[in-house]
Image (cartoon, rainbow, N blue to C red):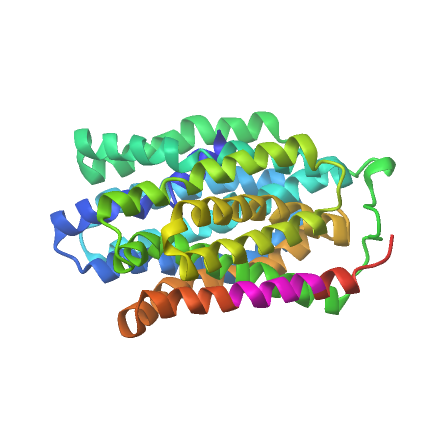
Amino acid sequence: MAQIIAWGGSFYLIAVLAAPVVADTGWSQAWVYGALSLAILLSGLLAPSVGRLVARLGGRRVLVASAPILAAGLALLAVAPNLPCFLLAWVVIGIGMAAGLYDPLFAALGQRFGSDARSAITQITLVSGFCTSITWPLVAALVAHLGWRGACLTYSGLLLVIVLPIYLRTLPPLAALPASHAAAPGASGTAPDRRVFLLLTASFTLAAVIFTAISVQLISLLQNLGFSLTAALGVAALIGPSQVGVRVLQVVLGRNAHPIWSTLASVLLVAAGLAGLLFATQWALVAIVVYGLGSGIRSIVRGTLPLALFGPATYAVVLGRIARPVLIAQALTPLLGGYLQAHFGATATLAVLGVLALVNVGTVVALQRHMPRH
């Protein structure tokens, strides 16, 4: 519940808020959407520092602090009299995102459960798959009844009265890991192998670029390929159920397999889905379902694979180091993807994404070959 509310009030907020903000203020749409890129960029720059804070102070303190920071950013949005203040509010939200979304939470779970955190991470990503289905209608209803400023202020209150108490009540203080949980198979808790770390970071960054580009551009890409708006929306709507469905399968069937195999399945499915969109547009429904399956697995392995490779002792720091290039790439993707589509068209954009997906398959294969043999 806390993660759904936190994501809905930060990363996914602008999707609903942008149009009413532009209509009310007259500010440039590019600046309004660019505010989210600013927040993601700042979140990426802060990620290694947040990872070290989690390792030193414990995930509970960091996550508890994230709720009032996000609430303050939303409150500042609600009263922003001009564009600079609006951008400043997103700077505050970016700080809250760095402290309160998946990476610090996964690190906190790693501290609490050690190598057994995988089950909790999988279940949380399963439930969080319903985030947009819950928060987008909620924010839209608040905007309809209270205006966009009132919606931000109300959502700020939700973070204080729901998310903050959840973190205070459910997250334990930092304590030493039980001996039985202190090490993951194949991970001693020492400094990570540089080659494995770089391959893992490269794979996660490529996956994040593809995910962000599809999330932002899929509707317009499909329209440029000849789909009507209604048909494009119908096809795109299949991603969410596909992601949730494959996470259910992961919980039921994949709990005992090493996360590297889930990672390989994810990148292969994403590459196959993009190839289907590019070369067999008439099978777009199937291609999007295949892509959605791969994308759904991605959210799980983002937390479980680093834990399996490096162990809980260095988990928080490793997640923070990985998150920086991933989030910076995500921040730049809408700008670069939009430029690519505007100047070279939808087919070229999908081709580039397909090439990146194939490179990611090779990256994961190389990662599997260089992993410790256990």
Q: Residue 180 location in percent, x, y?
A: 86, 36
**Drawn side of residue 211 relative to residue 263, left or right:** left
Q: Is residue 357 magenta?
A: yes
Q: Is residue 14 above or below residue 130?
A: below
249 or 192: nearer the viewer = 249
Q: Quadrant of residue 169?
A: top right
Q: Is residue 142 above or below residue 102?
A: above
213 or 292: nearer the viewer = 292
Q: Quadrant of residue 286?
A: top left
Q: Is residue 276 magenta?
A: no
- Which residue is at a point 71% across and 52% down the rendered structure image? 260
245 or 4: nearer the viewer = 245
Q: Is residue 161 above or below residue 29?
A: above
Q: Residue 119 location in percent, x, y?
A: 68, 34
**Drawn side of residue 354 relative to residue 307, left or right:** left
Q: Which portion, as a residue range, is magenta?
A: 356-365
178 or 347: nearer the viewer = 347
